[in-house]
Amino acid sequence: MRVLWLFSLLFTLSFSDEIRPGYLEVKATGTKSFQVKWKVPMKESMVLGIKPIMPKNCKSTPPSRRSVNNALIETTTMLCSDGLAGKTIQIQGLDATSTDVLVRITHASGASFMKRLTPTETSFKVATQQSAWDVAKTYTIIGIEHILLGIDHLLFVFALLLIVVGWRRLIGTITAFTLAHSITLVAATLGWMSVPQAPVEAVIALSILFLAVEIIHSQQGKVGLAERSPWLIAFIFGLLHGFGFAGALAEVGLPENSIPQALLFFNVGVELGQLIFVFVVLCLGWLLKKSFTQNLLRKGELGIAYIIGSLAAFWLIERTFSFWF
């Protein structure tokens, strides 16, 4: 059963211009000295109006600034007279935005602490260690947000849903995709495998383009590999998408004393986000099937395939150009 899921595509595309989270990293270089990295999203020359407010007992050197991948990065060194434990860190201006800030504190002992700040929770007290519940909650939310804000990953899943016929094949296909990206996510995060991120992002775009072409061929009566064995295509390209997830997780980092738990719950978050998306798409697909004729749905599906393919081709060229030239 293949239907036009136009509303689902619009739902997906609405995330293409999302506000990415800010990131604050404070790493101890001694008992009272720290290296601070502040990364804030920017668009063209406009920088999101948020900034970290450190405890009063801390003094910082003038920051060095550079822009990388639509983000402003500031680095500085900080000296705190009696350390950071028990002190409050605040993100000024966060309550006036719709974004989040991920904070990572690494103590001199090597223990690390992760905290997710939101417009409704703009400050926190630095703890010496993080509870198991905090790790699970933080990394599950990070995983959910990453998949739901990752338009390329969602478009791949969306294209699969347009191709797959029947519930059993759908369950098998989603399971294959989940298994594949879980394998490479774990392997890349733990350092067992290493793949350059830029080519991976380009091939992810290629995977979406491939599925768009398969949808068009199917409309023309040509049965392709993706329609015959969708689980195989989902597994092969899922391995590459897992490297993409690992790259995002690498930017956030993992707490040294809770790596397995953080990795597990990040992956759980990715799967929950993926299931939410699939559920919404299927529900909207059912509503559209009830509202429009089969002929109109097929024509609309073909148009969507061309839109997906065009977007994927643009990404492929852009991402290839970024590392090839």
Image: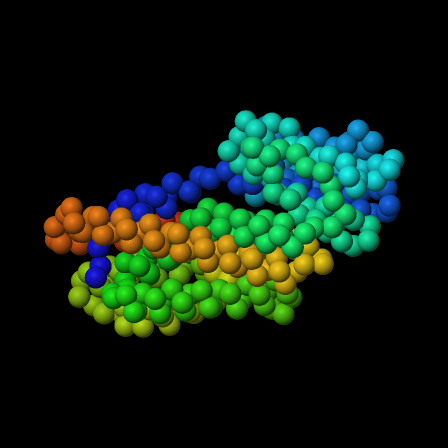
Q: What residue lies at 27% left-to-right and 72% top-to-bottom?
A: 228
> Residue 182: x percent and y percent?
51, 65
| Nearest the eye: 186 or 244 | 186
Q: What residue lies at 38% left-to-right and 40% top-to-bottom?
A: 14
> Residue 292: x percent and y percent?
14, 47
| Nearest the eye: 93 or 43 | 93
Q: Is 235 situated above or below 114?
A: below
Q: What residue lies at 71% left-to-right and 57% top-to-bottom?
A: 256
Residue 313 visible somewhere in the drawing: no
- Residue 137 left/right relative to 230: right
Q: What residue lies at 79% left-to-right and 42% top-to-bottom?
A: 85
> Residue 246: x percent and y percent?
56, 59
Q: Is 56 situated above or below 320?
A: above
Q: Quadrant of the N terminus?
A: bottom left
> Residue 27: x percent and y percent?
76, 46
Q: Is 201 situated above or below 49?
A: below
The colouring scheme, among rainbow, by chain, secondary structure or one colour, is: rainbow
User: Total label count?
Assistant: 0
| Nearest the eye: 4 or 313 | 4
- Residue 9 left/right relative to 182: left
- Residue 235 left/right relative to 163: right
Q: Is 11 situated above or below 261?
A: above
| Nearest the eye: 228 or 95 | 95
Residue 230 visible somewhere in the drawing: yes
